[in-house]
Amino acid sequence: MRRPGQGPAGARGGTTLVEVIIGCLILAVLALAAMASLQYTRSMTVRQRDRRTALELANGRLEALRGAPFNTVRPTSSNYNVYYLRASGTTWVVSSSATSETVTVNYWPRPMRTTVQYVDADWGSASYDLLKFNVGVQYSASASNQVELETMRGP
């Protein structure tokens, strides 16, 4: 005699091989999705760390330009061209051609570009009214991944 709730005589309870394989496949897909999510999160964390380091380097360069004597960072002519600045020890080199300067962003050498441009704030004075500084630091291998900071300074 069978008890209520039991299957037909001779039937075994438990899971079949197909059910076990389907369960393993579902777990594998979930594990792959979790690993992809963790990898993406890690890569974004590294990218943000590199970006933050590049911002700190660019800000440090702007602070150095703000603290430098005005005559050492201004272009030699009062036109509106963009000039390039490069630090050489404790002095600044102003040139009309792009200079290649590299900084280390989390163990990787990356290009940094510093420019200066004359801005005539009073429309016509022969003196240097303001200088506009721009500092760009690339923080990954892609040239589109760079930070840029700008400031203006008077004499």
Image: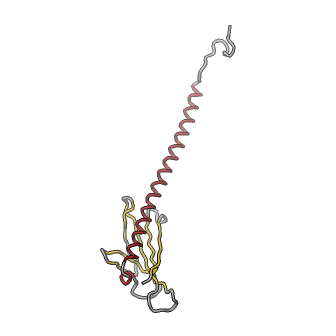
Q: Quadrant of the C terminus?
A: bottom left
Give 153 or 116, whichever is nearer the viewer. 153
Residue at image x 44%, y 77%?
133
> Is residue 35 shown above or below 2?
below
The quarter of the picture where the N terminus appears is: top right
Residue found 48% across the figure and 92% down from its top: 125
Residue, x 45% and y 61% (percent of image)? Answer: 52
Q: Give the number of callouts.
A: 0
**Which of these two is toward me, 4 or 108?**
4
Judged from this view, the residue extending furthest toward the right is: 4
The scheme the figure's colours follow is: secondary structure
Quarter assignment of residue 55: bottom left
Relative image position of residue 83 (x, y in whole percent)? 42, 80
* Residue 40 drawn at (x, y percent): 50, 50
Which residue is situated farthest in the left direction here?
A: 89
Q: Residue at x 41, y 88 (%)?
A: 77
Q: Quadrant of residue 20?
A: top right
Q: Nearer the viewer, residue 116 or 126?
A: 126
Q: Looking at the picture, does residue 48 appear above or below residue 30?
A: below
The answer to which image quadrant residue 9 occupies is top right
